[in-house]
Image: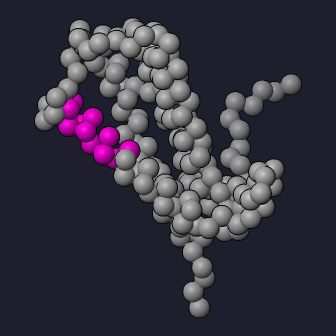
């Protein structure tokens, strides 16, 4: 039995207007793009500072563990919602959802939250970059290796905003009413 290492991209036929292949691949890559940040964040739940020199008071474990794990789950869930911008469940509410199942999703009900999220993500990303280049206060690290690990883990998050913006723009273009 031959093992398949690379799977075929999903079909685009479950949407009214097919999403471009690049948009499908980009939407499916979003959760993988954010995974390094989520994994890098997890040791903080157990008060392991990942080389950061920080004198801030530490929250008790019963607060920090659910907070950090919840933030990672929320981040990945938000990334998975980006797939709705290229799949059929972003156009028609799945039938298993009570009350609204089977109804058409108004395009602005997806575009407005996506763009609001993009603005927030872009502001956070700009703040991160400004702190790393020294314009804003930055976190000190024990050595360059810890700083490099932090940057390699967090930098993909800076791509989240522009990626969702591109997906939201093409979602809007696909869903807009035909002119004529």
Which residue: 29% across, 12% down? 57
The mark total stands at 0
Q: Vertically, is 72 above or below 176?
A: above
> In the image shown, does 38 or 100 lie closer to the viewer?
100
Q: Is residue 90 rendered to the left or right of residue 131?
A: right
> In the image shown, does 46 or 99 lie closer to the viewer?
99
Residue reaching furthest bottom? Answer: 180
Q: Position of residue 171 (x, y in %)?
A: 56, 63
Residue reaching furthest left? Answer: 135
Q: Position of residue 47 (x, y in %)?
A: 40, 9
Which residue: 56% across, 48% down? 82
Question: Which quarter of the rendering shows the C terminus?
Answer: bottom right
- Would residue 152 be counted in the magenta stretch? no
Question: Coloring scheme of the render?
Answer: one colour
- Would residue 126 be counted in the magenta stretch? yes
Question: Which quarter of the rendering shows the N terminus?
Answer: top right
> In the image shown, does 79 or 24 lie closer to the viewer?
79
> In the image shown, does 55 or 20 lie closer to the viewer?
55
Which residue: 27% across, 35% down? 128
Which residue: 16% across, 34% down? 136
Q: Is residue 13 visible?
A: no
Q: Position of residue 71 (x, y in %)?
A: 49, 29
Magenta span main SS = helix
Q: Position of residue 92 (x, y in %)?
A: 72, 61
> Which of the 4 image quadrants contains residue 137?
top left
Q: Vertically, is 29 above or below 179?
A: above
Q: Vertically, is 145 above or below 36?
A: above
Magenta residues? 121-132
Q: Is residue 60 visible?
A: yes
């Amino acid at each position: 039995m031959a093992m398949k290492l690379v799977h075929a991209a999903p079909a685009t036929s479950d949407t009214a207007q097919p999403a471009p292949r690049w948009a499908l691949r980009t939407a499916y890559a979003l959760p993988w793009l954010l995974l390094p940040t989520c994994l890098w964040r997890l040791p903080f739940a157990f008060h392991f500072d990942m080389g950061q020199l920080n004198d801030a008071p530490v929250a008790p474990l019963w607060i920090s563990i659910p907070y950090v794990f919840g933030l990672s789950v929320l981040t990945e869930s938000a990334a998975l919602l980006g797939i709705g911008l290229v799949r059929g469940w972003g156009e028609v509410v799945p039938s298993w959802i009570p009350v609204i199942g089977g109804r058409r999703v108004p395009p602005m009900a997806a575009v407005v939250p996506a763009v609001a999220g993009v603005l927030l993500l872009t502001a956070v990303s700009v703040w991160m970059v400004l702190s790393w280049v020294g314009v804003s206060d930055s976190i000190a690290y024990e050595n360059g290796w810890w700083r490099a690990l932090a940057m390699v883990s967090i930098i993909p998050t800076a791509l989240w905003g522009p990626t969702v913006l591109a997906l939201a723009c093409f979602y809007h273009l696909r869903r807009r009413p035909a002119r004529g």
